[in-house]
Image: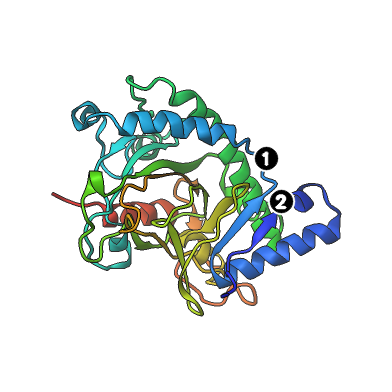
Amino acid sequence: MTRSPVPVIDLRPWRSGGPGARARTAARVDRALQEAGFLLITGHGVDPVLPARIREAARSFFRLPAGAKAPYAVPVGGRGWLGPGAEANSCAEGAASPPDLKESWSCAAEDPTGDPEVDAEWFRPNTWPAEVPALRPPVTEYLARMRALSDELLELLAVALGAEEDLFTRHTGHPTWGFNVNWYPGTDRVGPPLPGQFRIGAHTDFGTVTVLDREPGAGGLQVHTDSGGWQDAPWDPAALTVNIGDLMARWTGDRWRAGRHRVMPPPAEAPAEELLSLVYFYECDAHTRVESLPAPTGRVVHGPVDSHLYLRAKLDAITVTP
């Protein structure tokens, strides 16, 4: 059996262990992010009842008739419903592909900064479906937990680089973030996949860290490494999946690789398979200047980027235009 490049890392020694246990955890994270850009975390403290409540409410929304969902339709990066055909994630890599076979309910950061230009683009109010009032309360609670967990992960990542714990969190005082509830229906809804069509096409995420709560399935998540090619991502019912995005890879001078991944199309052997994922994309304060860490930590010197000009360009790239 091929060894998975994605380890399972228990956060409890990091949270409450001594210096040795914390150092060992950080070293394992460093190795995993160099190889695949992915890891699974347990001991994260998120009650599984919470994502279960979100899934139950979200399924009620996604199963509404298209006409009932249409008033909530938004473009990529908006707050509301991304309907079928809205995104083609492989386009972020410059690869033309059919649209992704999914729908999403999207939320994002909304607490204003006081800068009208920044707030108009990145901190707009979220929308909630009146037809499913049970969705907002668990999502709101979940988002607070994801924000705290993401900052904790950034502290762990800083220590894994041998840096001060606040190397990244000094840039998350008022960060942007995005949250997608991704619904992957079966072929009874979306029809047979076109050649080269996936539930989500191959891509890397765009920000710093992504935290994913997912369901296992034949048409599920795959990760890519240079040594192993495409492999099914491991799954642990007690774990959350974490990967780093493009901004973090640039920040570390490509010491760590952004986790390249895709979600397989509905499988021919299980055409009715339906999956629902909760995806939290963490970023940083608006217009953070992201510069590559120098050697020996960094391995490649990228030109500095404005984090949110970079993110906007990526969001535009995956938008399917009619």
Q: What is the secondary structure assignment of the residue under circle 2?
A: loop
- The location of residue 109, given as percent across then percent down, is 45, 36
Q: Secondary structure at mark 1?
A: loop
Q: Nearer the viewer, residue 5 or 33?
A: 5
Q: Is residue 59 visible?
A: yes
Q: Quadrant of residue 120?
A: top left
Looking at the image, the residue that sits furthest to the front is: 269
Q: Nearer the viewer, residue 249 or 182?
A: 182
Disc 2 and disc 1 in contact, CB within 8 angstroms: yes
Q: Which residue type carries mark 2?
A: Leu
What residue sits 52% from the left and 60% below the top? 248
Q: Residue furthest bottom?
A: 227
On the image, the x and y values in percent for residue 47 come to 63, 35
Q: Quadrant of residue 192?
A: bottom left
What residue would you read off at disc 1?
45
> What residue type is disc 1 on?
Gly
Residue 116 in percent (x, y) is at: 37, 33
Instruction: Name the residue: 85% across, 61% down.
Output: 20
Question: Where the N terminus falls, by quadrant?
Answer: bottom right
